[in-house]
Amino acid sequence: MIRLEVDAFSYDGTEQVLVGPVLQVHPGDHVVVTGASGSGKTTLLRLLAGLTGSDAGAAFTGSITLDDERLDFAGSEQDPRIDAARWSEQVAYVAQGAWGQLSMMSATVGEEIAFGPANRGVPAGQLRARVDAVAESLGLTPLLERDPRRLSGGQLQRTLIAAAMVQRSRVLVLDEPFQGLDDDAAAEVAAALEVLRREGTGIVVSAPILPAPILPAPILPAPMLPAPIPAEAAPRSARVLALAGGRPVFDGSLADARTAGLDRFGIGTMGDPPAIGEAPERPEPAAAGAALLELRNVSFRYPQQHGAPHGTGLRGVGFSVSSGEIIALRGPNGSGKSTLLQHLNGLLRADSGSIAVDGTPIRSQPTGSFAAVVGYLFQDTDQQLFERTVLREVAYGPRSIGRRRPDAERRAAAALDEVGLQAVSQAHPYELGFVQRRLVALASLLATGPRLWALDEPTAGLDAPAREVMAALLRAHARGGGAVVLATHDAAFAETVAHRSLWLDDGRIVTQGGTEHG
Amino acid sequence: MPRRRIYNPLTELLTAALLVVLVLVVNRWEVSLAVLLLVVLPAILLSGRARRIGLAIAIVVGPLLISSLLLHGLFFPEGERILLDLGFARVTVEGLAFAAVMGLRTSVFAGVLLTAAMTLDIADLVATMTHCGWNRKLVFIVGSAVGLIPQVALRGEQITRAQQARGLVVGAGLPSRLRALLAVTTPLVIGLLVDASERNHMLEARGFSARVPRTSYRPDSDTPGQRLFRILLTLGVGAFCLTWIVLVVLT
């Protein structure tokens, strides 16, 4: 149906970011394009989507064949130009970054899905029929009148897929659709993709790690989504194209890929623990220092907001964290993990109960005054990056707690070195890939030097090397007398790195214990 | 709760615009007061957002009223009946009256326009504009207000939270708040530009450049009755204003 052959591709005519991959997609295929950060996944997917970059100085040599029509590219100005609107009728593309994919002029999910066909002048009656059909396939019918800006991550991603697929394109290309989604949301999206694949759509998905195979389970009739499907799963028949440094290093079945030793290319497998050697060293209670963090009977309720579902609050939460400890907050989506984390540096203030960090009770002090003691990593990295260069970004924390510029920049450079990003210190944070942006956010926390780290889903969307960097840094921080509280759905990571887990449900701690509970 | 909508947004916008024209042309305080009490005030009270609209009007009109009072109340050259002579300035009855009339008209303008803008159903307006065959780029600009303005507010809030988590302390004083605002502006604008460049391809892929007339998922809330009403209203106000100018202003 579609075949992409890349002899070479470069963005600026110098460094080749893709050399030699060939990708073929047939109806009902599910192809996973995998590779560590910077391996060329996004570039390959953009080529499939018809974005050859010829108008932006990129040089592509190779060919794209869609059915019987073959387009040859020689990296010259005479190369064919692809009409994005016509191409998308055959090959739908969902890029990274959900907000950039929304039309921003639709008040409801139904209007968002209808945006494309409405632009093409499809009469109103047919428009509704098309929207209803795709919404039914993807389990979106109950959401059609909802505001797209108020959807959960999984619902938003499914809306974008529906908007791209409303024309019944035969190939759907998705660039890291699970990025930043928690397990429940990722499972929703995986189920939606499986529905489309079974209807004959060729699916191409990029991912930094190999997905788990979907176990043979009955598919419920539409509009019910198939269940249960593990997060970020792919069907057993899925094919894998693995890239490293822009070159293909594996092309075969998912089962073979899982045993092909792709970890040497920085390609991990979903559910594997980070490869950081020995088991976690539990600090002896006697060796552990005084409580660095202490919560007593903390309760919190979100204020009611018009039209917005208010998040789970906290109900009588109490625990303490000593120096040298890594604690994992675990539990289902909406159980209160992020809410609890945001209490540790004053982003949210408890209605009752008490919280003390390093002996200082959190009362009415400004949030910023806790930055020297508590470092916070947001779940959405892009919330956290706001400076012009990576170095300035990382130096912001030390500067804001009173370090002089040379000292702040020295600390920033050292932190960037620790996460392996010194080479990009003068780049703009938005020029980096997702994994690198996540590491920049972590480096900014390192540079400020707080003793307590509060990390919200720190491994979401990371590739295997970055996940290992994260694990190693957490352990080193604990060994150095710091403490970490992380909210995570990544069971294997929590098992390997954390000393104990606190399980939350509906805003209260339901189980405390060693990570073997997970 | 926002009120249930009765009229099409185009009808509401046109009515608001024509009211402003009427108050501008008929320069009588009685007319301004009547529009304020009989149209603007009930509209605000029935809007379901009376507090927010009231606050917005106060923020816009308050400074204008004060400056008008100071300017015309103290320095009105035609003023004859002096209430207070300060040497460098004179408080006159005529000056105060002029300031009051100006303030009244300003209140009517702000009241009419802000009430219309703050109760407008933009999604409905976009649907109507599409059904009427307006230029799709213009429709997109208007429609972007649906998602973009709340998104800007949300993003600004998120950046402030991230900056606070990393040590930004926003004090109660104006300089501190201004610094915080500046710190948010740059990343906010850059983020919006990045989103816009990503959105550009999505718009192309979803046929935004197509040349056929755009259709709408939303049904048209406009009716033949309202179209007729708008035409009659425009003709009526136009004819009245013309007559007023000829008979009253020019004689």
Image: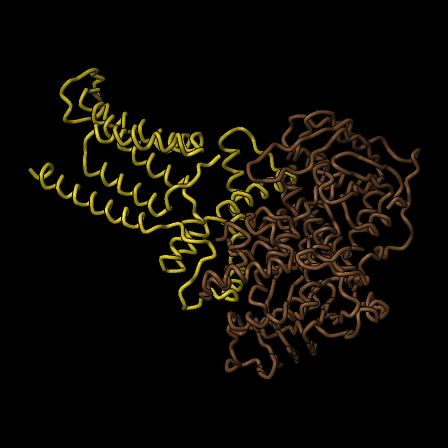
Asked whether the viewer can see residue A297, the reply is yes
**Figure quadrant of the C terminus of chain B:** top left
Chain coloured brown in this rendering: A
Spot occupied by residue B96 in the image (x, y as percentages of width and height): 22, 23
Nearer to me, A331 or B101 = A331
Q: Quadrant of residue A132?
A: bottom right
The residue at 78%/59% (across/down) is A465
- Residue drawn 13% across the image and 20% down it: B80
Instruction: Please give left or right for residue B168 compared with residue B119 in the image.
Output: right
- In this view, A148 is above or below A404: below
The one of A446 and B100 positioned closer to us in this rendering? B100
Q: Which residue corresponds to the image point at 48% horizontal and 53% vertical from the top-left? A: A105
Residue A62 pos. (x, y %)? 62, 81
Q: Position of residue B27 (x, y in %)?
A: 19, 34
Q: Foreground: B17 or A490?
A: B17
Instruction: Say if A503 sits above or below A198 in the image.
Output: above
- Chain identifier matching the yellow colour in the rendered picture: B
